[in-house]
Image: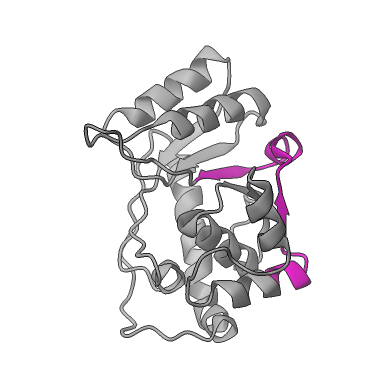
Amino acid sequence: MRSKNIKNIAVIGAGYVGLSTAVVLANTGYKVSLIENNDKRLKTLKTGKSFFFEAGVNELLSYALNYKYLTITSDAHTVLDSSDIIFSCVGTPENPDGSSNLRYVYEVAELVAMQAKNNCIFVQKSTVPVGTGQKIEDIFHENGCNIKYASNPEFLREGTAIIDTLYFDRIVIGSNSKLAAKTVLDTYKSVEQKREKLANIANIKPAKNKPGKY
């Protein structure tokens, strides 16, 4: 059963983390919008095919599109204005000195601050250095936003991201808001309840079926 507090979910970034997150949540029963601004990727995804290999992702993507669970768009304004929870899954490429380039992370935060509705929950899934969350919250505050922030780092492996999303061995959520933390946790509990059905749709099977840790 999906979380009753959440009706609309936005996922920003259609890389292996964002796409896996979007198709799993959509097939769990949430109304999900996947935001991607690369035209070539957008066209490919709308045909029900991923632009990279990920076991099970095409099956879940096609299923979600066919049953209208998932919308793929570049129209961030319309989507963010009606989203209850927003997952940021943009890339953090490596700088020449080995540090993470957080340009896209902060660009998303600025976008959300300007276009998302108040009282929504912003979930940072991209792997970021300590202190990034506070800077994102500062961006929200500077723009007069009442947006709840949660950190939810991903532990997905490329090639098995769908399996890792369905059969997670641990979930880490950090937030100053108990409501935000509980809401994010509830979305994962929803996935846990539907994962056997989703695994059948994706035609995948985990090596081990271990209970997830929260």
Image position of 201 with respect to 91: above or below: below
Task: Look at the image and say whether residue 70 sits in the magenta stretch.
Answer: yes
Q: Position of residue 68 (x, y in %)?
A: 77, 65
Q: Position of residue 55 (x, y in %)?
A: 48, 76
Q: Is residue 33 visible?
A: no
Q: Position of residue 54 (x, y in %)?
A: 48, 71
Q: Residue at x 46, y 28 (%)?
A: 106
The C terminus lies in quadrant:
bottom left
Q: Left or right? Give the position of 204 relative to 113.
A: left
Q: Residue at x 43, y 26 (%)?
A: 136
The front one of 65 and 24 is 65
Q: Which residues are magenta?
A: 64-88
The front one of 187 and 58 is 58
Q: Residue at x 60, y 36 (%)?
A: 120
Q: Residue at x 59, y 58 (%)?
A: 3
Q: Quadrant of residue 170?
A: bottom left
Task: Look at the image and say whether residue 13 sits in the magenta stretch.
Answer: no
Q: Left or right? Give the position of 11 relative to 151.
A: right
Image position of 109 with respect to 51: above or below: above
Q: Position of residue 115 (x, y in %)?
A: 67, 28
Image position of 213 with respect to 41: above or below: below
Q: Is residue 152 visible?
A: yes
Q: Left or right? Give the position of 209 relative to 22.
A: left
The N terminus lies in quadrant:
bottom right
Image position of 76 with respect to 154: above or below: above
